[in-house]
Image (tube, helix red, strand yellow):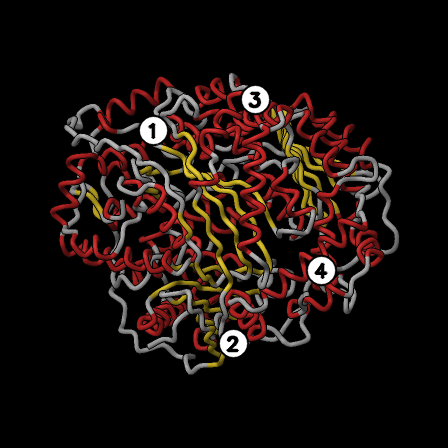
Amino acid sequence: EHMMFRGSPDLSADQLATIMAALGGDSNAATQQTLTQYFVTTPVEELESALRVEAIRMSGVLATEELWVKERGAIEQEIARDLSEPMYIFHTRLLAHMFAGTPYAVDALGDKPSFDKTTGVMLRQFHQQWYGPNNAILIIVGDVDPTRTMTMVRHLYADIPSRTAPARPQVTLGPLTPAVLDMETDLPYGLAVVAYRLPGYDSPDYAAGRILGDVLDSQRARLYDLVTEGAALYAGFSGEEQAPASLAYVAAAFPKGGDGAALVQRLKGIIEDYRRDGVPAELVEAAKAREIATAQFAWNSTSGLAFAWSQAVAVEGRTAPDDDIEAISRVTAADVNRVAREHLIGETATTAVLTPGESGKPRTVDGTRGKEAFAPKEVKPVALPSWAEGIGELKVPAQPPAPREFHLDNGLRLIVLPSEVSPTVSLYGEVRNRPEIQEPPGKEGVAAVLADLFSYGTTSLDRIALRKALDDIAASAMAGPDFSLLTLADKFERGVALLADNLLHPALPAAAFAVVQQEQVGGLAGERQSPDYHARRALLTALFPATDPVIREATPETVGALSLDDVRAYYQQIFRPDMTTIVIIGRIDPEEAHRVIARQFGAWQASGPKPVIDLPSVPPSKPSAHLVPDPGRVQDRVMLAQVGDVIRSATDYYPLQIGMHVLAGGFYATRFFRDLREDSGLVYTVDGRLDAGPNRSVLTVGYGCDPENVGKAKALIVRDLQAMQQEDVSTDELRQAKMLLLRRIPLSRASVDGIAAQYLALVRDKLPLDEPQQAARRIVSISAGEVRDAFARRIRPDELVQVIQGPAPQ
């Protein structure tokens, strides 16, 4: 998988990276135990180029020893990253026991010893054995002409020879035996886990097992009662579905210092009760209806629908996703209860208690300057193959359909975009607020307590009744400052009525307040001892003045001192229609959407003046370096950052964004990736971004590497930032960065939730809804000199704040 991005005999790594960036940069791959998925999302006019790339890669891979040695360093950093994550470590131990004696006992990532034994010859041989058209499934989703597309596919793939793949090993699972996998972690909370095996893809009981998992995870089921009773911070069901058997586990989170062993017994008892007495038939029917509705929502995302087909056809061996839905529609409560009796056996379950460990306090270290970095290699122009020469043409994307806008008399803003892609309607909304500014002094944490209380129902429907009402229409809803509703089109009006009731008339019951307050106090107490917390606070306090609103934080003391009246007063303070935006996308007439929203939200009124919640301007941050010891990590997680004065409306904003896309955002085609991964193998990933608001900006660069390479990697980053100030970027780099930004404008609209998120962000930033089109015209015209000058004015490479989480750099 990794070496497929290092080039093929007919397409060099540089050519591949340049083409992928020109397609929009939205491409990657993922390997599971039985297959590797390669995926790319691109504007429809570039479909043929994307298909040609995959045909070339199917035909051959370079995988020379020299290239493999470089890539092995990056893979080893991926392993080190995962071995620094406690949930990954637990997952590998769980696999090793639950699937002992089979290939499924080993995570698909592999390990360092196996990579040390791997050679370029082995990689090419593996490609020759498995990467044949007769062993591949090609899935294309989008606004394409099927006949023309099939002609393209035949032209590009028909001459690739078939290959005889090795026989797949027969997998025979042994009987389950009980095990205890307790471990210490650097998480801010503990986890109690009970794991089982459920039927896999190849079992006729797979659909029943899937519904069983949905029932157990329902907020109307007994597992979730652990949360509402105050016995757990979280409780639910999770699964990892595979062919021979699905890995299934119930888990509950508890605050640091809690009794994880007792919680394990509670979990086992709940499951045993369901196994003995059966699950409620009503929850089985609700789960089936929700699965059927969820399949309709898959159509609302180009990549989501492609993955749904890939999962069904390539992973599960179905003919289409509808095969699973048909099987689910036939499931009965008796089927679910039989699967529960046969598989949820407490005597053979694997249990685990993941206990939060101790973390050292952050300390200042001498790391403000990296080690010397030598001058970069000259970035030479990449000569593209003739078929790809037109990919890099810079043009403003076509204007997308404009939404309808409405403004209610109370100030609520409604944005509606009709879509016929599925028989669904999606609603996303936001009450603009900023707890850092709006929480009263001494009441820090009241916003989080309020947010958790919305799930406890309304003044007319208690928690269970509200969940049942949503289940009755197979809808999903979330209430709070950020709210949403996903519903079938014919149930939209009922769904909006339930959502509005939850938003405008939350119950905020005293008993639930006591539980949520206790959970928040316990959660905060553990969080404040975790390495993640110390790293986050070290970065914030180094970047911002002590009096800045973002430095405010909830503590166990401030949350413990809250009263229910404080929560109710805060609700009245921030929930205002004139701070609210609702976006509706789906199969609905805009006038009908307006009528429904006006009926449910029109009487809502605000009191007092409209609040100003923009963060104030701040002085530039000063350089410093901080180490947060984290015993659970073998790899250092490093964050470099600085506060600047670039605001969202500044002339320099888009030149800086172009420069950041020269540095990051396009895999091997960008400088950070080339210098830190492709050429040196120091990191697996490196990310860089510039976020700007009305009064401030923050530049961040993040990476993970071995402790001995922290300084080397930082030096390369500083060098690359300085080069942006001193020299014009090349013509190819400038065009490529512009192309990344331009292509991402239509790609950001490849899903309903992506479109809604974009509209809400534009409203939040006080920008017009057509700002992406205006930005495109500005981006096309920006020169290399403007990029250089903007970096020289706004970026301070020698004044970065550095926070290292993990072992001390060597």
Q: Is residue 421 visible?
A: no
Q: Amino acid at mark 3?
A: Ala
Query: Which comes sooner in the sequence, label 4 or label 2?
Result: 2
Query: Which comes sooner in the sequence, label 3 or label 1?
Result: 1
**Disc marking residue 536:** none
Q: Which residue is mark 2?
A: 361
Q: Quadrant of the C terminus?
A: bottom left
Q: 653 or 756, which is in the foreground? A: 756
Q: Which residue is mark 4?
A: 435
Q: 789 or 214, which is in the foreground? A: 214
**Disc marking residue 314:** 1
**Disc marking residue 333:** 3
Pointer 1: residues within 10 angstroms few (<14), some, or many (20+)?
many
Q: Secondary structure at mark 3?
A: helix
Residue 502: percent from left, percent from top: 76, 39
Q: Amino acid at mark 1?
A: Ala
Real-space Cα distance between discs 3 and 2?
A: 52 Å
Vertical placement of residue 341 versus 38, above or below: above
Residue 29: percent from left, percent from top: 34, 42
Q: How many marks?
A: 4
Residue 484: percent from left, percent from top: 66, 39
Q: Amino acid at mark 2?
A: Lys
Q: Secondary structure at mark 2?
A: loop
